[in-house]
Image: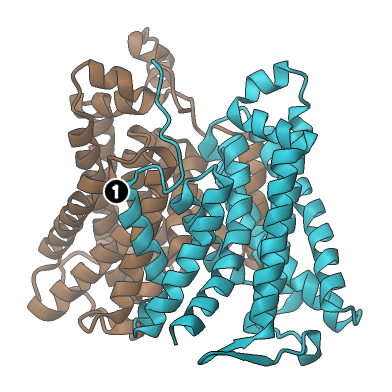
Amino acid sequence: MFLQQLINGIALGSTYALIALGYTMVYGIISLINFAHGEIFMVGAFVGLLMVSYFKMNLFLAMACSMAFCMVLGVVIEFIAYRPLRKSSRLSALISAIGVSIFLSSLAMMVFGANAKGFPDSAFPSHQIHIGDADISTLQLLIISVSALLMLSLEFIVQKTKIGKAMRATSEDYNTAALMGINVNFVISFTFALGSALAAAGGVLVGVLFNSVSFNMGLMAGLKAFAAAVLGGIGSIPGAMLGGLLLGVAEVFGVAVGYSSYRDAIAFAILVLVLLVRPAGLLGQKIQKKV
Amino acid sequence: MYQYLVNSIDPYTMQILVNIGIGIILALGLNIITGLTGQLSLGHAAFMSVGAFAGALLTIKTGAPFYLTILLSGLITAAVAAAIGWPILRLTGDYLAICTLGFAEIVKVVFLNLEVTNKALGLTVPAPNTTLSMPVTVLIVVILVIIVSVFIENSRFGRALKAIRDDEIAAESMGINIARYKVQSFAVSAFMAGIGGCLYGHFLGYINPSDFGFLKSIDMLSMVVLGGLGSVPGVVFGASLLSAAPEFLRFMSQYRMLVYGALLVFLMVFRPNGLLGGIDFAALVLRKLGVKPRGAAHEKQGGH
């Protein structure tokens, strides 16, 4: 029973973590809460669904297409809605992000209708594996392994490549990075592309897991992923992974012990409690303000 | 006489006007914590919710006079805000924002599960028993809230809040008790949200916890930022525009929310400080009257 719930929690949590990574990377670089990120996750799920059901692609190819589409979408959104506002107050950019979010979700409702759509069963023929007294579906294993793979690749890009170094430099100090000859605009576009690709992958995985894709799925998933990013310490990439997994596991256990009607509050209650003890999140660094 | 005026406006227009009025009350409330004190709140709908349910329950269970109900629901909301604000206002910047968001989600879910708020079915609020009709009451409250907002902005209290917004460390070293002022402005802000919620519930006649979700908080925030953060005329204008916009865009039927979203982006891109942000109206009027404005005109507005 315990093992079963733990696996359920990790599968759910790793999708939260995939979305949370986009929030935390964007925040780390331009200090913007990208409220449109949840909608990118939703668009990713729809593109994946289209690829699987109309173009009869297999799930992995569909996921790759969806990631590529959302990369472009993320870069375009940044260019239109955030770049002109980079020098103005952060709240203006926040409202702009909210505008994008409303725009995308109503566009999705017009194009795909208000009803939830499901992936065809043939998308991923899932079967159960028995480990001890736990029934684990191959779908959950797929989700966990794909998420782990994506997060490891992200870690590789950020820590080992030149562009990753540029990202870290920009997030440390925007102006100094620009003075050192880093093309800051390119780095920001690249960050949006990476974050959006991860969200798209998360969208396809969640769509298959719950067998439901709808125009309003981005809102709650986005808020919870944002909570996960803050829980881990916003701006910190390992923090987002840890935060996502923690919230996923907590939510599944909360439901398992009978608080299912409080499901959506569990993540936020944990967040508030943790922030009261550690105001900068679990892995966040306390930044000393200089006067 | 009022009644004659009220009756001469058709019900549809009246409903839009009352919505605008309630929007102004809510937005001016949020303006105090976000515009003046500079603390981003993403969960103000929760206070509206507390006020709406407090008001509805007072009317249903006790049948208290409507004006007392409005006042009490504001006070209850302020007390709740002070209790929550005390621990969480120690957090800074976006950590505070996410905490208010989280708190709002918790309030929503708790109300959805409470027996007294009738769970997910929501409450039907009986029409208030008053001598003045609802639109007139809303109008009076709007005028009072505007007067109080202008008064706060120019008072010692308001100047302390603005000092906190502009530079916390500098304000603290000038002897301003940051924690106390933050909690006080949070409570005042919630008081107005509670009143707005109470009016909203009694005007609509039905409230459901799900109505006060994240999107409602975002609506309120958009009004404040779009109109001009920290500027009372700006916030009034922003609230009027956004409360009425869905009605004006109704002819586009299904494209309505699409246009609304695009509109938010474009307005922010072209007027990043809000439509009326950065304009000092008092100085403007004084100059028109030929009076030389005093030092206040040079005060810098917006941006933090």
Camera-side residue of B19 and A164: A164
> Residue A51 occupies which quadrant of the picture?
bottom right
| Model colouring | by chain
Camera-side residue of A264 and A21: A21
Q: Residue at x 59, y 50 (%)?
A: A23
Q: Is residue B165 visible?
A: yes
Q: Is residue A211 left or right of residue B299?
A: right
Chain coloured cyan:
A
Chain coloured brown:
B
> Residue B40 occupies which quadrant of the picture?
top left
Q: Is residue A77 visible?
A: no
Residue type, mark 1 in image:
Val
Q: Position of residue A10 (x, y in %)?
A: 54, 71
What element does badge 1 sit on? helix
Q: Position of residue A281 (x, y in %)?
A: 41, 47
Tell which residue pokes out farthest to the front in this image.
Answer: A132
Q: Is residue A37 left or right of residue B274?
A: right
Q: Is residue B173 left or right of residue A38?
A: left
> Residue B163 occupies which quadrant of the picture?
top left
Residue identified by numbered label 1: A277
Q: Is residue B29 left or right of residue B261?
A: left
Q: Position of residue B272 (x, y in %)?
A: 59, 34
Q: Residue at x 43, y 30 (%)?
A: A287
Q: Which chain does the residue under circle 1 lie in? A: A
Q: Looking at the image, is B56 positioned above or below residue B244?
A: below
Q: Looking at the image, is B46 positioned above or below residue A1?
A: above
Q: Residue at x 24, y 16 (%)?
A: B173
From the image, which quarter does the C terminus of chain A lie in? Answer: top left
Camera-side residue of B158 and B94: B94
For label 1, the crowd category at 10 Å Cα-Cα, with few meaning under 14, some 14 to 19 and many 20 or more, is few
Q: Looking at the image, is B218 positioned above or below residue A181?
A: below
Q: Residue at x 46, y 71 (%)?
A: A249
